[in-house]
Amino acid sequence: MNDFLKQWGEAAVTTVGFFWMALWAFILGYIISSMIQIFVTEKRMQNTMGKDASKSMLLGTFFGFISSSCSFAALASTKSLFKKGASFVSSLAFLLASTNLVIELGIIISIFLGWQFVIGEYAGGILLIGISWMIVTIVRPRGLIENARKNLGSENEGEDVDTSKSWKTRVKKEDNWARVAKKYKMEWQMVWKDVTVGFTIAGIVAAFVPDSFFETLFINSGQGNTNFSFFEILEHIVVGPVAAFLTFIGSMGNIPLAALLFGKGVSFAGVMAFIFSDLVVFPVLRINARYYGWKMSLFILFLLFSSLIGASLLLHYAFDWFGILPDPSQVKIQDSDFFKINYTFFLNLTFLAISAYLVYLGFFKRKDVPHKMSEMAPKSQLLAQSLKYTAFICYVWLLGGLAVKFLILG
């Protein structure tokens, strides 16, 4: 019993420590994301993308890069762009870029996994887009694309935004910064459950799950082992999405768990596949089916899973060839002094102050400024409620663990 209490306390402290390490990065990333979404609207994206195939694909990638990393927001934006006339390939490029190339995700990865994984994330995102484009070019699913457009139909979607042409003019208006504040709040509303559950699971895994479990799940993994055969790497890549499916909590919440997997000896390719897997899980499959029909949804699943395998393999062997494969020993997320006075402490204080100002501006000083809610992909009520109540259970678990750590065990 005493061992369980000790592990419970360690799990709770690890979870809170993980979040403290990443807090300033979350705030910075969502502020940047909110600013871009207010000053560069979806309507302007569509007008700029046009219908030229090569240009629209490049612009789809760029606009995805500067858009939200929340999978459900990305799915809704992709559907809207596709419905308004963007090509299937450019819409797919937007979807992949908006979930793999976004700024805030790169910042979080740099904190937990290091610079090699940041390069892997961005290079892999480009590879995912390129491989998907190649498969679409070879398969030529014109009938599926036409049917998908028919399923979507057409509708007019207004935008409650400032229509000033000059971005300099828009940036100077206080009303727009109030909208940024409201968007910033919405960003947190979209991810708080995923982040809570993801970080809590990471703390529990760090404290309770033995290394032998990972060595069984991922063949030949283990601390200190970096020599994998091709088939072992391939197995890691296939199992990575399975693990992501079982812990579907979004890319941002999954990063601490990805760091744990790498620290336990899972290959670089397997960890990258795990990170890339937020679009090949059942909730996303179901949403795409509601948008485009089941045939197109299954084709997208095949397309993304194939691209994921190809991108992860190419990254692993390219990094190995250049001699920059990361060392699992560089990931030290257990027995860490999370709360010491260092740059993280001061960055957190600075960005918490900025958050407080945004709350004051958007919800007290300029609460009269209207702002349209972003469209979200239709989560099932069961999934949404389950995740919500799971997050509340996580808070009870964390409070209990902290009480055990500091009040009972001392």
Image (tube, rainbow, N blue to C red):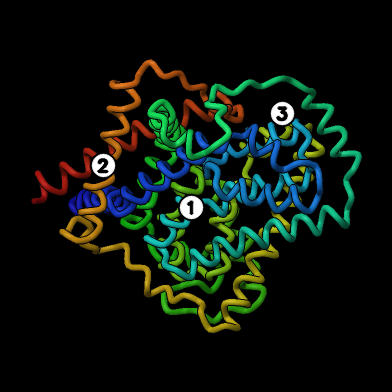
Give the residue number, with chain letter if any, for mark 2.
Answer: 352
Instruction: Characterize the local packing of mark 2: few (<14), some (14-19) or many (20 or more) Cα atoms within 10 angstroms.
Output: some
Residue at the (61%, 27%) spot, across then down: 378
What's the distance in space between the residues labelled 2 and 3, CA to CA?
39 Å
Say whether residue 111 is left or right of residue 321.
left
Is 175 on the left-hand or right-hand side of 158? left
Above or below for 15 versus 41: below
* Three-letter residue code for mark 2: Leu
Tell me the mark number nearer the camera, choosing from 1 and 3.
Answer: 1
Amino acid type of the residue tagged 3 in the rendering: Arg
Between 310 and 394, the residue placed more toward the observer is 310
Q: Which residue is mark 3?
A: 290
Element on which disc 1 rests: helix
Which numbered tag is attached to residue 103?
Answer: 1
Q: Is residue 49 left or right of residue 361?
A: right
Please identify, in this view, whether the residue under mark 2 or under mark 3 is nearer the observer: 2
Q: Nearer the viewer, residue 362 or 317?
A: 362
Neighbour tally class for label 3: few under 14, some 14-19, many 20 plus, Cα within 10 Å: some
The residue lying at 77 percent from left, 22 percent from top is 154
Decide: is 218 above or below 75: below
Question: Quick check: marks 2 and 1 in contact, CB under 8 Å?
Answer: no
Residue 222 percent coordinates (x, y): 45, 73
The residue depicted at 53 percent of the width and 70 percent of the height is 267
Disc 2 is placed on an element classified as helix
Which element type, helix, strand or loop, lies under badge 3? helix
Binning the other alpha carbons within 10 Å of mark 1 as few (below 14), some (14 to 19) or many (20 upward) gives many
Q: Position of residue 184 (x, y in %)?
A: 41, 34
Q: Along the polypeptide, which appears first: circle 2 or circle 3?
A: 3
The amino acid pointed to by label 1 is: Ile
- Residue 316 percent location from the top left of the image: 60, 73
